[in-house]
Amino acid sequence: MSKKQSSLQLMGLMLTQKRILFFSILAMFVSVLIQLVIPLIMKYIVDQVIPRQDFFVFGGAVIALILLPIVASLFAMMGNRINHRIGAHVTDTVRLQLFDKFLRLSPAQYHNLNSGVMNQVIGAAGEIGDLYMTQIVIPFIFQAIMVVGMISFMLYLNVELTLISLFFLPFVVITSLMLGKKAKGLASDVMKMQTELSSYAIEFFSGLKSTQLFQQEDQERAYQSAWIKQYRKKRNHTFVVGQFAEIMGHVIKSLGFGVVFAYGAWQIFEGRLTIGSLLVFIVYHPQLYAMIEKMQFAYLKTVETWPKTKLVRDILDMEVDRTAGNLIFAETNEPVLSFQNVSFAYEENRGQLSRVTFTIDKGEFIGIVGESGSGKSTLFELILRFYEPSSGRILLYGNDLSSYSSQEIRCGITIVTQEPFIWNRSIRDNLRYVKPEVTDQELIHACQIAQLSDFLTRLPYGLDTILGEKGVKLSGGEKQRIGIARAILRDPTILLMDEPTSALDAKTEALFQEQLKQTFHGKTILVIAHRLATVKDADRIIVVKDGRIDDIGSHQELMRRGGEYSQLYNEQFGEKEAP
């Protein structure tokens, strides 16, 4: 997307507030008009009032010179307040659009965005609205009106002196364009480094324990020092460019002022210009160049802000790569799930599946086993439509999975992952997150089934205990039990469980499995497990090897065949089991 397109889209958001924007522009116009009139009043005093020694008019003019700047300031303040309000509206709108976009993107798209980019885009969204309204768009309009007004009055008073005054303006514009191009590249570099720092900071705090464990503090310090040195170099370069632009502006302005003053004085000697008119030029000339400098600043600020604006727009313009079907999730007499020659691979060729075919009937308890990286979890990712198959079809109750929207699928299918995400909220809030309308009685019942009751009684605040960021106050087993309780509250038609009991002790796992059979009796359950005891009693076990279905059968059938499953089982238990 071009800078022009992004700016136009932001302007579109501003124009949704066109009623108050009109009052902002009106307030600015009044403020500008007053500021333009003040030098003309001074001219009138010098050329007309003082020679006539009209003290009454002189007193009135002086009072006007005192009051008019105050009035202009009040109108400017009113305009700025409105601008801030519009800027806040743009910021809030962009933030909401971003969060809505994040909610609709697929994991495949998230994988292309590192955490630093995500943090940068949220930060940028909080700045661009206010920046555009208070430092770029509205100030630019204000300055443009001032410039046009001053040039008009100057031309009316003396054309020659005006042309001399304007002679130096092209040098200001050329300098601005040249330095703007340089500033744009530097701004992009700085933002890229800020993104890298944001990503590093997240990794740094997440891996701080590992850093201390492996005694790599010096390595981290060296990385930080190198980054700070490089970042400071870029920032200093940016500062130098800005300072050079400011110095060049002062030089051109001073040179122009000297020439205008000298030529104006010569015209007074020749009787072609009044002292009052020269006074107007003396006031207008520095103001004119000051306005040009501010317009230059607005341009440079636009260039500096452009990388952030582009980052936000790139996210907002990302296509949601999942088609939205319109079928309603409903049970039928067809098989619950059917994979038909399904193939899939991530961009990095991890979790690859090749021509996977199997069918699951209603009420079956299916175990899925295989070595790490064989593609077991990828099956669940496809069922939940986090990813789409590269080829083949997945049927849900006889209908192509793509015929359902992702939201509809997830209404009837729930997953318990190996490490459920825990919000920095209370246990009650974490459980209600999956079902806001749940009653306390349902919460307690779900906690009993998930073997959380004893754990809750040991907590001083029970269900209202705050769990810390990412559940830092919980053990792995406690996190898994909260994940299980969530699944129970959802009461899904199909339950997917990816290593749901890997952090539970044998006793707790046995109790949970017994409760699971009772709670989800008649439901379809798919369980991924490395610990084969977890799925030994499954109706059927799907064995995945190198992205392919190696075998399917009950525990006894697979042991008799003596294939991959039998080998995995014997490796875990250390002895052969008779068929």
Image (cartoon, rainbow, N blue to C red):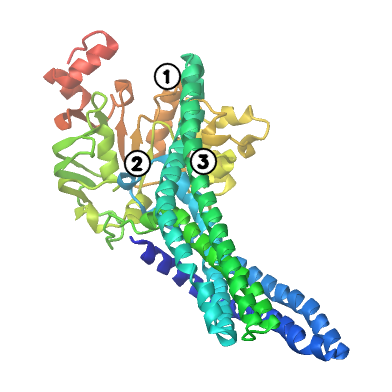
Q: Which residue is mark 1?
A: 506
The answer to whether residue 311 is left or right of residue 162 is left
Q: Which residue is mark 3?
A: 236
Residue at x-position 33% and y-position 25%: 534
Q: Which residue is mark 2?
A: 495
Residues marked 1 and 3 touching at CB (< 8 Å): no
User: Whole-percent x and y of residue 376?
Assistant: 25, 32
User: Whole-percent x and y of residue 72?
Assistant: 71, 76
- Position of 172 relative to 539 (above/below): below
Q: Quadrant of the C terminus?
A: top left
Going from N to C along the chain, the mark reached first, 1 or 2, is: 2
Quarter residue 2 falls in: bottom left
Instruction: Say few, some or many: other residues with alpha carbon within 10 Å of mark 2 (under 14 / 14 to 19 / 20 or more).
Output: many
Furthest residue toward top: 575
The residue tagged with tag 1: helix, strand or loop? helix
Quarter residue 370 falls in: top left
The residue tagged with tag 3: helix, strand or loop? helix
User: Whole-percent x and y of residue 398?
Assistant: 19, 53
Q: Amino acid at mark 1?
A: Ala
Depth check: give the residue in front, 456 or 144: 144
Instruction: Say few, some or many: other residues with alpha carbon within 10 Å of mark 1 (under 14 / 14 to 19 / 20 or more).
Output: few
Residue at x-position 46% and y-position 25%: 223
Q: Amino acid at mark 3?
A: Asn
- Give the Cα separation between the discs numbered 1 and 3: 61 Å
Nearer the viewer's eye, disc 3 or disc 2?
3
The answer to whether one can see residue 106 in this image is yes
Depth check: give the residue in front, 112 or 272: 272
